[in-house]
Image (spheres, rainbow, N blue to C red):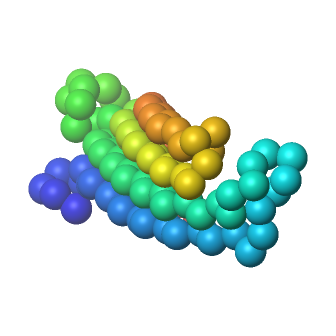
Amino acid sequence: MFGGGDFLLSSVAVNYDRYDDADPSISARTRHDWAARARMTYGIPWGSVFENAGEFWQPFTFTLGGEAYRQVSSITNYTYNNYRLSIGLNRRWTF
């Protein structure tokens, strides 16, 4: 956590998959893949963004996140990139 309740979450993962046999309907080659994923999410309390938001908005947190995914395969059809962007509004509940 930073100063006013805002936060930053991040993660990085790398994965290797090796398949036992080739799929003859796709390729005669045995498939093996390398994949990497990086994620980051930043959150800030709604009251910190809008100081005159009022009491109703105090338990809300605004989040912004992004993700990048890259897979490299021995078979070209399974090599790709994927990118995501997320925006959220979360509410804290207390009992």
Q: Is residue 43 left or right of residue 52?
A: right
Q: Position of residue 6 (x, y in %)?
A: 25, 50
Q: Residue furthest bottom?
A: 20
Judge by depth and name the residue closer to the eye, 94 or 73: 73
Res. 92 in view: no
Q: Decide if residue 42 is on the left or right side of residue 21.
A: left
Q: Report how many numbered discs are placed on residues in the image.
A: 0
Q: Is residue 33 left or right of residue 38?
A: right
Q: Position of residue 57 (x, y in %)?
A: 40, 34
The residue closer to the viewer here, 64 or 44, is 64
Q: Residue at x 34, y 49 (%)?
A: 40
Residue 82: x %, y % from top left: 50, 37
The reply, left or right, for residue 7 in relation to residue 56 is left
The residue under the point 27% across, 54% down is 8
Identify the residue at image location x=61%, y=48%. 75
Work out which residue is located at the far right of the displayed protein and give it. 25
Q: Residue visible at 36% across and 62% down?
A: 12
* Image coordinates for residue 11, horizontal then vertical, percent: 36, 62
Residue 81 visible in the current orientation: yes
Which quadrant is home to the N terminus? Answer: bottom left
Relative to 9, say whether 80 is above or below.
Answer: above
Q: In the rendered image of this protein, does residue 31 appear above or below residue 27?
A: below
Foreground: 41 or 3?
A: 41
Front residue of this view, candidates 7 and 31? 31
